[in-house]
Image (cartoon, rainbow, N blue to C red):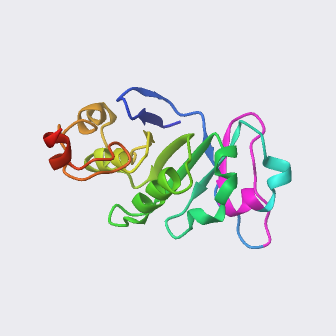
Amino acid sequence: MPDVIAADGTIRNDDWVVVPRPAAGESMDIPEDKPVLIPADLWLAGHEHFAGKPSVGVWFDSHDEPELLGEKVNELPLIAVNFPRFVDGRGYSIGRLLRERFGYRGELRAIGDVLLDQLQFMKRCGFDSYVLRADKDIAKAPKCLTFFTQTYQAATDTDQPLFRRRAS
């Protein structure tokens, strides 16, 4: 199993299994003995069955809209956002919307094509855990999360831009 990096730079084992979207006409193969992340729309379709289970979270693909879950967002212990390619920035918007518009308070994880130089920007958008692409050195992750000491803009981690913070 891959390791997961927390926003504070700690590295731990990742127990969550990402269940891929089944092909048309097939059913999901969900392991019974491990916590799972299933596609968000399929969780919503089976809400009565999955709701309230601490071992079931969801994952969004980059083209999914967070509005899909709406007020049910805080029923989930973990939401992962898939970054299919490092140049696809839609996941940043999904993370920020989940935190700011929908008030998601659980763990928000970046998965997929996650690179070291993206970690601090993902953190600013509300992500608090990350699964790096397999060919990246996880030992470098803690430094990448704190590479910049100051930020100019407001984001999920600070509600004031730098010029206002300096003025106060």
Q: Is residue 12 above or below residue 133?
A: above
Judging depth in this view, the residue of 85 and 150 nearest the camera is 150
Is residue 61 rendered to the left or right of residue 150?
right
- Residue 27 position within the rendered picture, expressed as x and y whole percent measured from the top left: 80, 61
Q: Is residue 3 above or below residue 99?
A: above
Residue at the spot x=14%, y=41% of the render? 166
Residue at the spot x=76%, y=52% of the render? 29
Residue at the spot x=42%, y=62% of the render? 93
- Residue 98 position within the rendered picture, expressed as x and y whole percent measured from the top left: 52, 54
Residue at the spot x=54%, y=50% of the render? 80
- Indicate the quadrant containing the C terminus: top left, top right, bottom left or bottom right: top left
- Residue 39 position within the rendered picture, expressed as x and y whole percent measured from the top left: 65, 58
Residue extending farthest to the bottom is: 24
Q: Is residue 59 magenta?
A: no
Is residue 113 rendered to the left or right of residue 163?
right
Would you identify the image quadrant in which residue 136 lies? top left
Judging depth in this view, the residue of 141 and 25 nearest the camera is 141
Q: How many marks?
A: 0
Is residue 31 rendered to the left or right of residue 139?
right
- Residue 1 position within the rendered picture, expressed as x and y whole percent measured from the top left: 53, 36
Residue extending farthest to the front is: 168
Is residue 73 rendered to the left or right of residue 11?
right
Which region of the structure is painted magenta? Answer: 25-44
Residue extending farthest to the right is: 48
Would you identify the image quadrant in which residue 67 lies? bottom right
